[in-house]
Each structure stands twice: as C-alpha cells, then as structure tokens.
C-alpha cells in the first residue's frame, strides 16, 4: 500500500479507538458495563445488532462466496425476518420483564441452576471459538495479501479493540459499532460503483449481471432437488434457508447473548422490538448487495486478467510439491485462454487448477474464496480508497468481536463468577472484575486465532458451522421453556446433553448440510425432554 493508504488506515483505526474510549464513560456497575443502563434508542440497537452479526468475515468472504458459488448463499438469510418476528413477540417481553443480565438467567427461573449453567457453558464454548475465528479470518487474508506476519496481525486485530471494549463495555461497543457500520457501508458502495466503472466502456451494470447469469452466478433461488431427489447435503437452497436459516437465526438472535445483550440495552420493549424487526427487513437486502459485489468482480475478471488462484502464499506452497509442473502448465494454459479471449475455457482451467491445488495440499483444504475481494481492492482501486477498504476489514471485525467479548464477560460474571464464586461484591468491584474477564476472553480468543490456521472452506461457512453445532440445542432448551410447560429441569437438562452429543455425531458422519443441524438439535431437545419427563416422574413446575 502507498503511504496515503497507510495513513488513512492508521487514522481510521485510531479514531475508532479514541471515539470508543470517549464514549466509554458509563456507570461503574454491572448494569452500566454490560447493558449501558438499558438506555439506548432503537437505531443504536439496530446498528449494534447489525454490527455484531455483520463481521469482517461477512464483508471479506461474502463477495468471494458469490464469485465462486454464485448468489445462492443469500438464501441462508431467508428465514431471518420470520425469526425476528417470533423473537419480538415471545422472547423480548420475557427477558425485559425479568430484567435479566443474560439470556440464561431466564432458564434458572423456568428450570434450575444446572440447566442454566449448561446452556450458558455451551454459549461460552461456541462464542469463544467463533470469536477466535473472527479474529483469525481477516488476519489470514490481510497477512497473505500484504505479506504481514499472521501472528502479529492476530495480535493487532484482536488486541487493539480490547482497549475500548475493556474500558467501556456495552456503551462503547454500541457507539463504535454505529460509526463502524457507517464507514463500512460507504466504502462498500464505493467499491461496487468502481467495480462497474472499471468495466470496458461498452459494458454497464446490466451487462455485468448478464455475464454473471450466463456463468450460472445469478442462482438466487435454488430448490436443492436433483434427479435423485432432494440433496440433504446441499448447503444453500430455499428450504435449508427458510427452515434451517430460521432455526439458526432464532437461536442466534434469541438465545446467543452476543445478540441478546445488544437489545437488552434498549430503553424499553418497544425500542428492542423496533431494532430487531428493522434488522429483519434490511439484513437480506444488505447481504444481497454484498454478494452482488462478488458478481460484479466476477464480471470484471471476465474482461480483465486476474490470477488463476487468488491466494498467492498457498500457491507458492503448492508449487513446492510434486504438483509443481501441473500447476505451472495450467497457469500457462490459463494465460493463453485469456489472451485468446476464451473466458469460458479460462474459467474451466481455473476450476481444474483448484482441484490440483487440493491434491497438492490435501491437509490444508486450499480455497481462495476468502482472497477474491481484497485482491480486487489491492490491485484495482485508487490510492486512498485501498487504505479505507482495508480499514473496514478491521472495523467490521472489531464490531462483532467487541460485542462477543462483552457478552462472554457478561455470562462469565453473571452465570458463573457471581453465582458460584464471589456473590457479594461492591458495584465497583463488580465493574472491575468484568473488565478483567473481558481482557481474559480477549486473550483467549487471540490464542484460538493463533491455532485456527486450518478451518476448511469459506471462512463465513466455518463460523456458521461452529454455531450450528451448538445453536440448535441451545434453542431447543429455550423453546421447551416457553412452550412445553409440563417439562421440568432434569428432563430438559438430560435431553440437552444427549442432543448435543447426537448433533456432533451427525456432523462427524457428514450426511447432511450443517444448516439442518440447527433444526435437528432443537427438535431432539424438544422430543427427548417430552419423552423423559414422564420417566423421571417429576412434578411439573408451578
């Protein structure tokens, strides 16, 4: 990057940290640190919800996902609007009425301590691992494209945001997320505009979409049905999106405290509901736009020669193997096909090239999806804008990671520290221990990021797979709490443990797409708890 880009990157990141520290002034007690004194308006709740969900992984790998697999990933979000309605009707009033600090406190009111503790522990495990990936993902791509050391990049990515998250809690998170989301959307709109402008003079926006459509990239709606019937391993189709996506969104926004903690900061139920419902309206169009940028980049590379493989570092590793000659030959064929303007042949060669890469490095599962967007930015955008785009990767990462650290600290303090260890502390002592737990989870997440080098295909999938392993079971516990009044604590507790083990087993067997794990986990808990309750011969809770 140029000095101007470096200056813009550093100034943008420094400004966010300073702004976060400035806004971190809050009441020095648990209510102020974790819930911003329940004082935020709906628009801050909305931006905080969006900033928590739309991590750097969303902006970083979303365009690459569309470049490689088309628009069908948008179906993953089709169940989200309906989930927002259900949460607004059933979840929000209960959480608000009980004035809970964490979502899992409700489970003790409804069931018992062990159910609350187990469910909270599942959240801590899933969110702690996901946060590590959220740090690692942008660090991996930035280090590869810019030649930065991956471990130092992890430290910077995770370490800098700890400063304002630790000092300011929920209030600092909410206000910085507002600024971060504004900068992110401005930068993305500029990138989309330039992707079209950089096309040949005779090619416009509509033409770019036609090019994507002719290559099968405009596959917005897919059914998942083949000649052999429904493909349960198909990751993204209308049914997995509506059903699996609904259960995932219901669990994520309704039971994952990184999200629940965002709308608990609202000044009243009305503001919480408004933030959630508007999120349901804007999320699908937002994700559609992010994926659309990937289609525009794909069209751009039909007219302008790009690399046969976008991850240069992994490519060099592959060329140290016995597949070196095959890779070099395919690179020459790719260049020749592009010189002859045979883009169809070039795309076929690119797919073949990826297959050889996988055989060359079978243990790494190489995939260049995550590198497409920033490669395009680095090679084609003007000086100044490159620094801003790289800054949004940090900002988007910080938005989701800061909220995650705040929620992890909240659950650790409320569901474990004050429940089992030190119950009587002054408000100031509570405040200080919360800061230390925030720091502790920050360090934990950075450590996870250091060991997350081999997490599979698209990074956006990796995070969702981690969530899907736990979210269905957590959701099932809450659904039983809301709607199966005859079930008591022991039944749902044992049902949750059995269900979690079954979900992990099913995932290991690789017989179904990960989105369906959310449905399976929830149904297992509901069915098993209903069956176990009569066998345990316990009286129904009053």
Image (tube, rainbow, N blue to C red):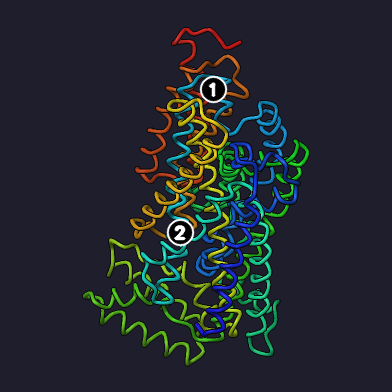
- Going from N to C along the chain, the mark reached first, 2 or 1, is 1
Q: Viewer-proximal residue, 37 or 239? A: 37
Q: Residue at x 36, y 53 (%)?
A: 447
Report the quarter where the C terminus lies. top right
Where disc 1 sits, the SS reads: helix
Q: Nearer the viewer, mark 2 or mark 1?
A: 2
Q: Is residue 130 left or right of residue 298?
A: left
Q: What residue is shown with label 2? A: 159
Query: Where is residue 436 shown, x and y percent of the image?
Result: 46, 44
Q: Is residue 215 above or below residue 444?
A: below
Query: Where is residue 126 shown, x and y percent of the image?
Result: 45, 43
Where disc 2 sits, the SS reads: helix
| Number of dots carrying numbers | 2
Occupied quadrant, residue 271: top right
Q: Residue at x 38, y 71 (%)?
A: 354
Asked whether residue 520 is in view, the answer is no
Q: Viewer-proximal residue, 139 or 351? A: 139
**Crowding near pointer 1: few (<14 within 10 Å), some, many (20+)?**
some
Q: What residue is shown with label 1? A: 108
Asked whether residue 137 is in view, the answer is yes
Query: Where is residue 434 shown, x and y percent of the image?
Result: 51, 40
Q: Is residue 291 above or below residue 344?
A: above
Q: Is residue 321 above or below residue 415?
A: below
């Amino acid at each position: 990057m140029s000095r101007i880009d470096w200056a813009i990157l550093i100034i943008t990141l420094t400004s966010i940290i300073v702004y976060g520290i400035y806004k971190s002034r809050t009441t020095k007690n648990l209510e102020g640190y974790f819930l911003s004194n329940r004082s935020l308006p709906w628009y801050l709740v909305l931006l905080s919800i969006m900033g928590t969900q739309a991590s750097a992984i969303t902006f970083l790998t979303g365009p690459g996902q569309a470049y490689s697999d088309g628009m069908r990933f948008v179906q993953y979000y089709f169940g989200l609007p309906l989930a927002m309605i259900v949460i607004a009707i059933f979840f929000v009033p209960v959480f608000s009425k009980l004035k809970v600090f964490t979502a899992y406190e409700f489970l003790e009111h409804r069931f018992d301590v062990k159910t609350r503790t187990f469910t909270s522990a599942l959240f801590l495990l899933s969110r702690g691992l996901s946060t590590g990936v959220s740090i690692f993902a942008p660090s991996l791509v930035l280090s590869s494209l810019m030649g930065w050391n991956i471990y130092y990049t992890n430290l910077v990515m995770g370490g800098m945001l700890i400063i304002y998250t630790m000092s300011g809690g929920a209030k600092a998170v909410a206000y910085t997320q507002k600024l971060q989301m504004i900068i992110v959307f401005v930068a993305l709109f500029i990138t989309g505009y330039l992707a079209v402008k950089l096309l040949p003079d005779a090619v416009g926006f509509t033409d770019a979409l036609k090019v994507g459509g002719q290559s099968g990239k405009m596959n917005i709606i897919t059914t998942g049905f083949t000649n052999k019937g429904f493909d349960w391993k198909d990751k993204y189709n209308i049914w997995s999106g509506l059903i699996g996506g609904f259960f995932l969104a219901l669990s994520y926004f309704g039971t994952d405290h990184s999200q629940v903690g965002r709308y608990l900061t609202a000044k009243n139920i009305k503001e919480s509901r408004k933030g959630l419902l508007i999120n349901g309206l804007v999320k699908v169009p937002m994700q559609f736009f992010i994926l659309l940028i990937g289609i525009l980049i794909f069209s751009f590379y039909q007219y302008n020669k790009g690399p046969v493989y976008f991850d240069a570092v992994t490519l060099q590793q592959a060329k140290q193997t016995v597949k070196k000659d095959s890779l070099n030959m395919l690179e020459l064929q790719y260049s020749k096909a592009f010189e002859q303007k045979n883009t169809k042949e070039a795309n076929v060669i690119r797919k073949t090239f990826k297959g050889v890469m996988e055989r060359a490095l079978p243990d790494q599962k190489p995939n260049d999806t995550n590198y497409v967007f920033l490669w395009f930015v680095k090679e084609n955008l003007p000086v100044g804008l490159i620094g801003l785009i790289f800054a949004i990767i940090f900002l988007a990462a910080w938005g989701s990671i800061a909220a995650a650290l705040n929620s992890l600290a909240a659950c650790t303090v409320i569901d474990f520290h004050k429940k089992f260890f030190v119950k009587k502390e002054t408000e100031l002592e509570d405040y200080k221990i919360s800061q230390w737990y925030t720091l502790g989870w920050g360090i934990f997440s950075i450590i996870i990021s250091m060991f997350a080098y081999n997490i599979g295909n698209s990074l956006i999938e990796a995070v969702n797979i981690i969530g899907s392993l736990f979210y269905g079971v957590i959701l099932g516990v809450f659904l039983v709490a809301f709607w199966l009044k005859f079930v008591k604590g022991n039944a749902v507790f044992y049902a949750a443990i059995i269900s979690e083990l079954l979900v992990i087993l099913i995932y290991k067997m690789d017989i179904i797409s990960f989105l369906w794990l959310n449905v399976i986990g929830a149904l297992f808990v509901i069915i098993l708890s209903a069956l176990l309750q009569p066998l345990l011969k316990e009286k129904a809770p009053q």
